[in-house]
Amino acid sequence: MVLLQWVCEFSKRDENSENWKEEEVTENSLFGTEDDRPTQIPTQAQSLVEGSRLMMASEFKPPTDVDYLQELLAIQQQGPRNIGFFGTRNMGFMHQELIEILSYAMVITKNHIFTSGASGTNAAVIRGALRAEKPEFLTVILPQSLKKQPPESQELLSKVKNVVEKPYNDHLPLIEASRLCNMDIISQVQQVICFAFHDSRLLMETCQEAKEMRKIVTLFYLD
């Protein structure tokens, strides 16, 4: 598969590419926008040199980045689906590049991506989806109105065809508006992919809600 060969070549550019810690719920269980506040965020230097360990919760041997991307792509053999991407704003450059690859891969295999408009995870998802040049397969749902987003986010969102604003939530604290936004995304997808720290309370809550709604949930821990 040309796509997987491309992913493999990208991963081999740096033998020190990070391993993530990942937990996947394979039962009939999905995921949002932004977390509260991760502590001890790894710097980009740490991400590039040291890496953070990735391991399946049910296995002792951690898969490589390429192995896990292949596993996620294999899921798509069952046919395209709606997928919600959630995650932290705070991550290194290498993590963002890998998320872009995953998002790109999902879109070119005709999966419809739903995400929000924050920096970090959401921005990486949007960039990857835009590279696939299939604008109809990307929907960005904002927790509040577009004008409430930071300037850098507004610039990126101007390239997205399907942007859903929620101006009626402008009066709410961002954390509450984000919680409602995450629930909206979950209700429209079959699968959730989340990138979080263990103390990312909002993301953990969103992931748990997705499981209770019997969505497929794939959770990557960044610490």
Image (cartoon, rainbow, N blue to C red):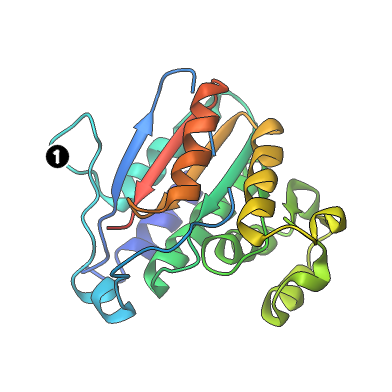
Horizontal arrangement in the rendering, residue 212 relative to residue 110 (left or right): left
Q: In terms of depth relative to the viewer, which is nearer, 106 or 93?
A: 93
Q: Position of residue 169 (x, y in %)?
A: 80, 55
Q: Which residue is mark 1?
A: 61
Q: Is residue 158 visible?
A: no
Up the image or down, 137 lies above or below 187; here it is below
Q: Quadrant of residue 189?
A: top right
The residue that appears at 65% across and 57% down in the rendered structure is: 129
The residue that appears at 38% across and 70% down in the rendered structure is: 94
Q: Residue furthest left?
A: 60
Q: How many marks?
A: 1
Horizontal arrangement in the rendering, residue 182 relative to residue 136 (left or right): left
Quarter of the image with the C terminus is: bottom left
Q: Position of residue 37 (x, y in %)?
A: 43, 63
Q: Is residue 33 visible?
A: yes
The residue that appears at 62% across and 26% down in the rendered structure is: 79
| Crowd around label 1: few <14 · some 14–19 · many ≥20 (10 Å) | few
The residue that appears at 50% across and 52% down in the rendered structure is: 102
Q: Position of residue 58 (x, y in %)?
A: 22, 29
Say what secondary structure mark 1 lies in. Answer: loop
Q: Position of residue 12 (x, y in %)?
A: 29, 64
Up the image or down, 27 lies above or below 43; here it is above
The amino acid sitting under disc 1 is Lys
Q: Quadrant of residue 128?
A: bottom right
Q: Quadrant of residue 59?
A: top left
